[in-house]
Amino acid sequence: MLKINNLQAAIEGKEILKGIDLEVKPGEVHAIMGPNGSGKSTLSSVIAGREDYEVTAGNIDFQGEDLLDLDADERAHKGIFLSFQYPVEIPGVTVTNFIKTAINESRKARGEEAMPANIMLKKMREKMGLLEIDSAFLSRSLNQGFSGGEKKRNEIFQMAMLEPKLAILDETDSGLDIDALRIVANGVNKLKSKDNAIIVITHYQRLLDYIVPDFVHVLHQGKIVKSGDKNLAHELESRGYDWLKEGVEA
Amino acid sequence: MKTEESYLEEVTASEYKYGFYTDIEADKVPPGLNEDVIRLISAKKNEPEWMTEWRLDAYRKFLKMTEPKWPNVSYPEPDLQAISYYSAPKKKKELESLDEVDPELLKTFEKLGISLDEQKRLSGVAMDVVVDSVSVATTFKDKLGELGIIFCSMSDAIQEHPELVKKYLGTVVPKSDNFYAALNSAVFTDGSFCYIPKGVRCPMELSTYFRINEAGTGQFERTLVIADEGSYVSYLEGCTAPTRDENQLHAAVVELVALDDAEIKYSTVQNWYPGNKEGKGGVYNFVTKRGICERNAKISWTQVETGSAVTWKYPSCILKGENSIGEFYSVAVTNNYQQADTGTKMIHLGKNTKSTIISKGICAGKSNGSYRGLVKIGPRAQDARNFSQCDSLLMGSSCGSHTFPYIETQNKSAKVEHEATTSKIGEDQIFYCNQRGIGEEEAIALIVNGYCKDVLNQLPMEFAVEAQKLLAISLEGSVG
Ligand SMILES: Nc1ncnc2c1ncn2[C@@H]1O[C@H](COP(=O)(O)OP(=O)(O)OP(=O)(O)O)[C@@H](O)[C@H]1O
Ligand SMILES: [Mg+2]
């Protein structure tokens, strides 16, 4: 589904990603861990198509297509979704209106009719139930005045509504309280299928207790320095990153 | 049963058929302005003596005045002697089909979602009219007539309701109020008159659209709306379709009178031709709008301004009666080389008067937008309150936005609050939208409409929807 090859990217002349290789197949869950500043969010932004980053080498193939040829919105139309580490506020635009616009713009791009209001409504109710979201929430301005946890829950709500092929969750667990973490993680699990894939970026094992990864990768200074199965995350939890860093720097 | 909307459709669909002002001969006075020209205008319109004198008095006052220089705009001074002050509206040349219309204009119509028939009407294409316009107009007039509501052209009002015109004309905007108001008073030839009797709630939005016998918008329009005690009216002015006009200078005067316990809601969508991308052409729009509120009365101005090359406009409220309320909700968009200096004045004279000002400026391209607001609390305005919120949104780095709030308080009990913000559409907001599949233009439209929500919410429903689309179109291609 996703094949990243020797990806290198820079921002403002500063090299951040220094040759990433990663393959994600349908039905898989990959976790990416790594110290602060190692390039995890940069990687997700580059996959999503943020223009500030300059890709200096490598390529990203998504379902047989070169992603780097596409604009961010076109990538979204192909089914790429990013749950932001820091979701953005848009004053005056309600959650409902935003999601409705997002869904219909994607449908338009695929040559489909706008989603009929009754179907949209039904779907919203269903996903609200799944993520235990109160309906009053939907008429608030997008992310404005939302608590940290509410913002993250709203990201996953959007994911549930948009039903992406590949979802990248960038520290979705940070800001969520214990109950919310369980609710959101269970929600994500319900959205999982053999046809879609998830990349989870996190610092903590507790999220991976719910969303169990098939692979765990450690990113350090713009490179994947170690990959393994779910046990690698446990090992990191007890040992930290130093042993891996030494390996690289030595 | 006919709903308000179906009226709107029918009336607009049929408005074209009957030429306008058929009773007036098609002629034109030579350019220039002097007392004889004014006498001629008055005579052509068959006006009573008092009206002629009123105009002449305005003209004499006008002669002693000079063009205001304080607005933050610059433009070559219009040559007032080059204007012809009276011409019977020419019938536009009828086109055979839409194929002959400027394709740019058609594209804009399409984006606005204007129906084909309406497109034809607006661009002057001959139409086969299915609905008999006279009967529709009559139904409409009948309905208003039953309630005693008068809604007609200013010229008709002078003939048919001279007592009301005499009593109120120039009471809110005096002849000598300012240079262009004086000019308007001397030479106005178009405009609307509206009177809502005591205790009557006007059952439909009154729109200049409805007014059969109205040939587009004139150069010197004069509008007078009187809401008698305890009455209510919502009045719509303008339309979202791009309005081209050969007259460069437009100087309208609008006067609103809200008597005790009355309420007037006045909504404007202004989309005059702003000139081309290089700033050539375009309309100068110098407007004086003011309302007076008696006891417990309320006046609410809502405006969405996207057009004109140069605009100055300050819809104002004189809160004379105690407990009266003034509101001003405004979105002003400037793009390319447009210049706008707009705002409001809230003059608190009565006890316990309240005013709210919500102004949203959006500047793009090389344009310049200014908010200018005066909140004045008179010595007798015990416990007066004002809240002002003036926001500007900048798109790109070549535009300018300025805020000039003036506050004059002569009563210590008054509470005046002013908040102002300046923001830009963030790259991260656009990326966030993009990531959800929303393209750049659509993202800007979404963000801008969100920003203007508090104002757009004040507009009547259909008008609001059109205004939203209009905002998106006015800003097309302004980021990138
Ligand atoms: N606009 C920018 N200009 C300069 N440096 C930047 C910019 N954006 C990111 N960086 C740098 O790139 C590096 C990687 O940042 P990134 O946000 O990808 O880290 P991360 O792995 O997601 O960290 P965290 O775990 O703290 O979220 C950091 O050193 C950061 O300072
Ligand atoms: Mg990060």
Image: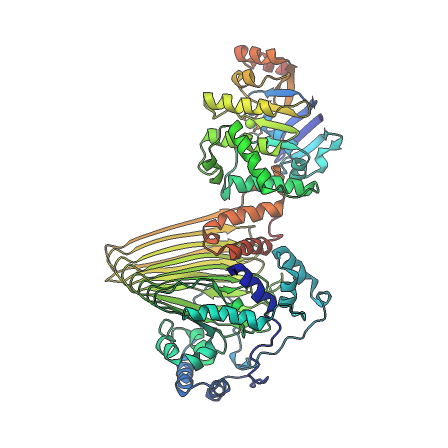
The residue located at (62%, 16%) in the rendering is A249
Count of numbered circles on the image: 0
The residue located at (61%, 27%) in the rendering is A168
Residue B238 spot, x, y in % from top left: 52, 65
In the picture, which quadrant includes the C terminus of chain A?
top right
Residue B246 spot, x, y in % from top left: 60, 73
The residue located at (64%, 31%) in the rendering is A164
Task: Dividing the image into four quarters, tell me where ligand 1 lies.
Answer: top right
Residue A83 vs B67, above or below: the answer is above
Q: Nearer the viewer, residue B159 or B302?
A: B159
Q: To which quarter of the image does residue B301 belong?
A: bottom left
Q: Is residue B216 visible?
A: no
Q: To which quarter of the image does residue B435 belong?
A: top right
Q: Is residue B439 left or right of residue A207?
A: right
Q: Is residue B440 visible?
A: yes
Residue A173 spot, x, y in % from top left: 51, 24
Q: Is residue B95 left or right of residue B304?
A: right
Residue B40 vs A245, above or below: the answer is below
Looking at the picture, the colour scheme in use is rainbow
Q: Nearer the viewer, residue B390 or B225?
A: B225
Residue B241 spot, x, y in % from top left: 59, 62
Q: Is residue A7 left or right of residue B12?
A: right
Q: Nearer the viewer, residue B271 or B74?
A: B271
In the picture, which quadrant includes the N terminus of chain A?
top right
Q: Residue furthest right?
A: A64
Q: To which quarter of the image does residue A233 belong?
A: top right
Q: Residue furthest bottom?
A: B36
